[in-house]
Image (spheres, rainbow, N blue to C red):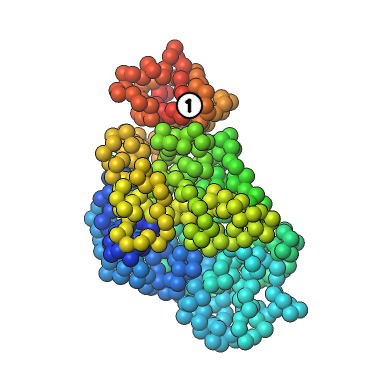
Amino acid sequence: MERKWWHDKVAYQIYPKSFLDTNGDGIGDLRGIISKLDYLKKLGVDIIWLSPIYKSPFVDQGYDISDYYAIASEFGTMEEFDMLLAEAKKRDMHIIMDLVINHCSDKHEWFQKALADPDGEYADYFYFREGKDGREPSNYRSYFGGNCWEPVPGTNKYYFHMFAKEQPDLNWENPVLRQKLYDMINWWLEKGLSGFRIDAIINIKKDLAFPDLTPDDTDGLAGCYRMVERVEGVGELLEDLKRNTFEKYDAFTVGEVFNMRPEELPQFIGKDGHFSTIFDFSAHCLSMGEHGWYDSPDIEFEQYRDSVFRSQLTVQKVGFEANIIENHDEPRGVSRYLPDYAQNAKGTKMLATVNILLRGIPFIYQGQEIGMQNAVWTDQTEFDDINTKDQYDVAKQAGFSDEEALAICSKMSRDNARTPMQWSSDVNAGFTDGTPWLKVNENYREINVREQEEDENSVLNYYRKLTTLRKSEEYKEVFTYGEFVPAYETVDGIMAYYRVDDEKRVLVAANFGTQSASLPLNYEINNIMLTNKNIADKNESESFVKEKQLVLDSCDVVVLELGR
Ligand code: GLC
Ligand code: CA
């Protein structure tokens, strides 16, 4: 396999609005990010993904861009952005930005011009279509609820939006528009960006006939992703995009791709694929409800393990995926994937270990490295997220009470991941001197960076050990390129795998169950690389190796180098 510069890297996602506020307006900013670069370096981070920082009305928290060439004033200035690039470079770190090109903001000048002249040139940057029999051109439900078609004022036309109505979809069939997007992408790459995380990109290919689809709920609509799943030809657009931009810069690209046809994986991330990598969302997808968050199933341990294993086994034949525990669109992973009894520092370390040492590029989401958890939401008005507001209504319409709808959103809300970063036990978790734009999780006095800095056994220091191990001269090769081989799959509650290459065999074994488990060791132990057990030194290894059996108590995890 051809080696790429990003194969052995560790990435970190920053959600700028919630990272660190330095001017007291309650909103995180670029200066805040710059001031924490050393913190990130010490965490072992090589690549930083910034969620959108472009100019935006923030209807969907910056995923609605009104100017692709400007930094949102809430976050700072272009000079500060250039400073961030330079400071990152000094530390041998890469910055990648979010690329949101399926849609823009309705406040973008292209859309404003389109509205002003619905038959003109700019209307063709979007999908403007006439209504059918006095109603919308088709019956698609947008990701954030309601019909995908919104009337164009003063006309019998509608425009198409798969997300909020303030996020009109861009017409990728228009070569003029495509070229403008490519120019913009290249402009950023010229500046010194190392690549992009590419938002919602599978949606750029539309079925231009926009046929009505069989309704999948009582509203008479069909989820717009159903059109995406049926339509052919997204690959040609993605190749055009890559050839005209990323490829020329050897950029690192990570696609947000749902609803891909499994057999197309090689086209997406194989040699010469559309992207460097895509996120592995297989665990996330386990909690997708049929109708919404209200019927979202709980995730059982075996399902979690099996979904991770399945994608590891599939992907390693083809390329690399990006592994996550959570991101800004999901509840916190420790609250979601860990059983109640494991929702503590020990369990958090266990989940971290099995995730970070998988084959692929680990993406740590801000706060994950200190074990941040879902917040406790006491009122619907505390939520900011557009998706959460819609899902609250969806639950209410399905007959749930206010209290039940609140509980449903508390569990699933994207705002769980967006509460301010917990830096210290000072007021507002040290995030801001002002009023935070979204409430701070009340557990910040127990879970925060400053206290964990001082505690050798903290989750934070454990994460540092994990990334150090993964990137160490000695083990980098096996953790990057070594094969993933499942182990002990038939033992209840155990998530274990080997990473193997010609020189080394590493075993990662975790006990997610409540009972202690004994695993027969098939190889000699050469080295105890890491464990979350409280053992003072390696000689205490007898405490978990008894007569060639590896004994793991509830929530224990261990990383061992074995004989080959
Ligand atoms: C992606 C983003 C999400 C956003 C959506 C629309 O899924 O991650 O935050 O709401 O795209 O841009
Ligand atoms: Ca600020």
Could you tell me which residue is drawn at 49 percent across and 33 percent down?
341
Residue 180 as seen in the image, left or right of residue 75: right
Instruction: Classify 122 as above or below 98.
Output: below
- Give the residue number, with chain letter if any, for mark 1: 554
| Front position in the image: 243 or 259 | 259
Helix, strand or loop at mark 1: loop
Question: In the picture, which quadrant includes the C terminus?
Answer: top left
| Front position in the image: 270 or 369 | 369
Return the x and y of residue 392 as percentages of the image width and height. 59, 58
**Residue pushed farthest top?**
547
Return the x and y of residue 494 as percentages of the image width and height. 52, 28
Instruction: Classify 88 as above or below 1.
Output: below
Return the x and y of residue 339 as percentages of the image width and height. 52, 36
Residue 230 as seen in the image, left or right of residue 14: right
Return the x and y of residue 391 as percentages of the image width and height. 60, 58
Could you tell me which residue is drawn at 36 percent across and 62 percent down?
435
